[in-house]
Image (cartoon, grey):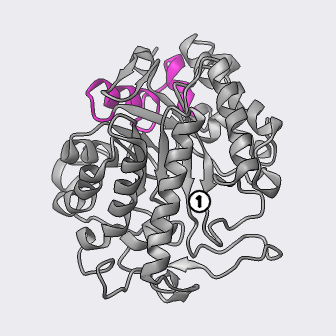
Amino acid sequence: MTDTSVLFQPFNSPKLTLPNRIVMAPMTRNMAPEGVPARPNADYYRRRAEGGVGLILSEGTVIARPASRNMAAIPFFHGEAPLGGWRGVIEGVHEAGGKMGPQIWHTGGVPSSDATFERGPLDTPSGLDAPGKPAGEPMTEEAIADTVAAFARAAADAKALGFDTFEIHGAHGYLIDQFFWSGTNLREDRYGGATIAERSRFAAEIVAAMREAVGPDYPILLRVSQWKQQDYGARLAETPEAMEQWLGPLVAAGVDILHCSQRRFWEPEFPEIDGEQGLNFAGWAKKITGVPTISVGSVGLNSDFISTFQGGNAESSGLEGLVTRMERGEFDLIAVGRALLSDPHWVEKVREARHDDIRDFDPGTLSVLA
């Protein structure tokens, strides 16, 4: 039976302490009518705090920019009523003994899955959602400055509401990531360029503005990814040197923890360097930048993953592989997504070795706040 104690060791960093190493990954719910979180949203997050999650990261919640969201019931993180709703969320999480941060977001040029949802002019780096796919118009420098300021206001509001941290969504082909990606950032001004370091300027300005808004001692998380929803095979950094050029300026600007999203946490980032059992994305990001990292990608989705609790064949993609990576310090925290939708007490059951009680992921939970 796999010893899972490493998952339940406290996490201590200069700005953030957590009771264990398990993070609830941000998951879009699109269940905040008029952009306002209400009692069902607050209860949903509170249940995960009661279930023992070390840190809850909210669904993406958008800044005060036109067309910042691409679905009608994505929550706002601006305005009196939405911020009042978020105050209720964090108060409930704290009452349950949990810690939480909102994920601050702008969807950029990504289209809506709801044909009836009307958006205004889109914010995009170069009028593209994907290489060769038009979407919106290139942002002016004034629009860029307004967007940076909107992120900073959201940071100040997160701190004022009492959240323990916040996460900037810089991944998965949304606005910030569209600036990183050479296929969607064709700008010829200071926000574009041939190198990933040059295309990181927009994100670095956002981080710096948010850092200024919250002061030096408040923890800032940033979620990044190589893959995009527009192209699962996309890569921003083909080498460790390119990854350093990408992530280094963001850490220098004020990021404390990098949340490194990959589709499968057990896949090596640069197997040509350290082999098929080599460091994953979060491992390389930690090695390169020196800051703590969160790994995420297909953790706990089904009973095949859990089977290693019961002495099944240990695979690198299962629990034993996760534990091995964490024991060797490859990354510091692990984020769990859909498994926590179906089972808010997933963490508690893992800790207590209640293996038979763990529920497999049920796609039906995607449509409810259970």
Q: Residue at x 35, y 31 (%)?
A: 332
In the image: residue 160, left or right of residue 365: left
Please state which of residues 163 and 198 is positioned toward the viewer in this rendering.
Answer: 163
Q: Position of residue 336 (x, y in %)?
A: 54, 36
| Quadrant of res 133 | bottom right
Residue 102 seen in the current view: no
- Is the residue marked by circle 1 packed among few (<14), some (14-19), or many (20+) residues within 10 Å? many
Image quadrant assignment for residue 208: bottom left
* Residue drawn where x is 56% and y is 45% of the image: 157
Picture residue at 42% right of the left edge, 48% below the top: 213
Q: Is residue 61 above or below residue 51?
A: below
Instruction: Name the foreground residue: 42 vs 279.
Output: 42
Tell which of 332 and 264 is nearer to you.
Answer: 332
Q: Is 365 displayed left or right of 315 in the figure?
A: right
Magenta stretch holds residue 320:
yes
List the residue tagged with mark 1: 63
Residue pictured at 62% horizontal, 53% vertical: 61
- The quadrant of the picture occupied by the C terminus is top right
Quarter of the image holding residue 114?
bottom right
Q: Mark 1: which secondary structure?
A: loop
Does 318 sit left or right of 205 as displayed? right
In this rendering, is residue 257 above or below 230?
A: above
Q: Which residues are magenta?
A: 304-331
User: For this view, does 41 lie left or right of residue 327?
Assistant: right
